[in-house]
Image (cartoon, rainbow, N blue to C red):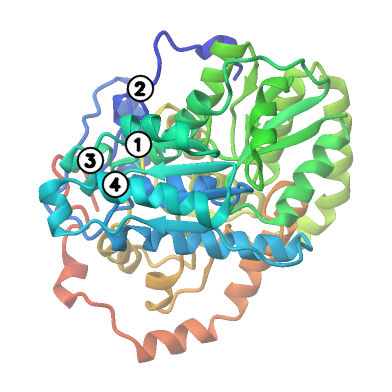
Amino acid sequence: MSGSALAPKKKYDGIREHRPETYNDYGAGSRFLEEGFRKKCLKNADRSFAQGLQCQQINSINALQSIEDSVFISHSPQGCVGCAALGTMQYRIGQAHRGIRGNRTPKVIVTNLDQKDIILGGEKKLREAVHAAEDRYHPKLIFVFTSCASGIIGDDIDMILDELQDEINARLVPIHCEGFKSKVCGSGFDAAFIAIGKYLLDKEKRPTQKGLINLFAPVSISYKDQLEIERMLNQIGITCNYIPFYSSLDKIQNITAAEASTAVCKVFADEFMKQLYEDYGIPYSHTVMPIGMRNTDKWLRGVAKIFHKEAEVEAVIASEHKRIEPEVEKIRARLEGKRVFICGGTGRSFAAAALIDDYGMKLIGLETPTYDIDAQTDIEYLNGIHGNFVVDIANMQPFEQVNLLNRLKPDVFIGVPEWAAKLGLPTTHVLDMKRPTFGYDGLLYLGNKIADQLENPGFNKKLASHSKLPYKASWYETDPFKFIDNSVWKD
């Protein structure tokens, strides 16, 4: 999919629900979703009860935390920056794997809004936090993130930062990621990229560097994944400018020098790549996450097409297939016929669903935070392989997940393992901070990882015998989508 096909008519506002045909909160069979979406008769449902929700600020902060010479200010109560712990851990692990000495921790300041500030406003605390960031760390960039609290009281952070800019050497970048703006957590990524485009690119097109591609990737991507992506692209003469993953102000500003753009996640920078095409004429490839044989082939072909390297990439794909297919067959013998339930982010969950087909496994259930035209493309492909399976469109609703797992009784669960592990199911994940999950090497690693978990389920069985989930037995007999309006679930 190239930029010329999808150039927007107006600036995107960063709220994913405002995009046409974007849905959250639904429970249905995959064939129903495919048909309903095609006929344009799906309706956004709502929940009468929700156990949790991932907010926008989590993704906005985590998207940027590995940028060099930066300070991150959360204009919020203290609890909101708990989300920074995940990105901090990922950043520190990533530095260690890259051989970076003097392991750095992201510099995060919170304005600590309290009850008094909610009544009188938090402007004074924000000004103090910006000056503290400058005086302590002397950064090149200071990112200021809004929160539900600062949005509700109406602090005008744009005006405040504009007034402060003459007093501060660092560039001040406001990021509007109030949690109540959107139920789709991917909107947090969009808020970060909108700020990059508005405040850091300077609306100047740098001279194009031949063979350079913007590779948009979150900090969760492992060093092994980075090496695998670089290995594959280098074979067809393409080099990467990773953004904002282990990036810097200069690398960000060099976005406009790239010959093209792509991303490793379908929801991470899709809207930003469209905007780059509209503002700077930079074409882009937006296909799939390169996990598994089919998806890696498709991702590589999408990139190669922009650079007019179709012949070169076919030679690479043929060589890679020849190299790994004997190993794939060995792993397939260990996994064929096993029934799988998958839970993950929108890009990664659908990528994992394609991956398991490489090993002859059967998809029986999939949980994803949202559903849109990209998900529809994947569902059409997956329905052709696996037939009808259960789809739970849910942003962190574990009570639905455990109900479905108890009903469907999969052989293996792929996703964040906590709840499934306490049911005694073999569990694994296609997100790994230490080893490759992308590309052809990632295909082999993940296959062996899934097979090893299936063959060694002892830990989870013991865990299940010594732990108890917080749900009554009656819940497991109830419609798992009972609290979703307009659910169409059928046993």
Question: Above or below — where is 330 with respect to 491?
Answer: below
Which residue is pictured at 28% across the width and 20% down the height?
A: 40
Q: Considering only order in the chain, which callout, 2 or 3, is on the residue closer to the N terminus? A: 2
Q: Are marks 1 and 4 in contact (CB under 8 Å)?
A: no
Determine whether the residue tagged by mark 3 lies in a helix, strand or loop.
helix
Q: Are marks 3 and 1 in contact (CB under 8 Å)?
A: yes
Q: Are marks 4 and 3 in contact (CB under 8 Å)?
A: yes
Alpha carbon of mark 3 to alpha carbon of mark 1: how far? 9 Å
Determine whether the residue tagged by mark 1 lies in a helix, strand or loop.
loop
Q: Is residue 448 visible?
A: yes
Q: Residues within 10 Å of mark 1 (few under 14, many from 20)?
A: many
Which residue is pictured at 59% across the width and 27% down the height?
A: 286
Q: Considering only order in the chain, which callout, 4 or 1, is on the residue closer to the N terminus? A: 4
- Name the residue carrying label 2: 38
- Name the residue carrying label 1: 176
| Image quadrant where one finds the N terminus | top right
- Name the residue carrying label 3: 151
Residue 449 in picture, x, y percent from top left: 66, 67
Determine whether the residue tagged by mark 4 lies in a helix, strand or loop.
loop
All told, the count of numbered labels is 4
Residue 232 in picture, x, y percent from top left: 81, 40
Residue type, mark 4 in image: Ser
- Name the residue carrying label 4: 147
Say which quarter of the image contains residue 84.
Answer: bottom left
Determine whether the residue tagged by mark 2 lies in a helix, strand or loop.
helix
Q: Are marks 2 and 4 in contact (CB under 8 Å)?
A: no
Residue type, mark 2 in image: Arg
Alpha carbon of mark 2 to alpha carbon of mark 4: how far? 36 Å
Q: Considering only order in the chain, which callout, 1 or 3, is on the residue closer to the N terminus? A: 3
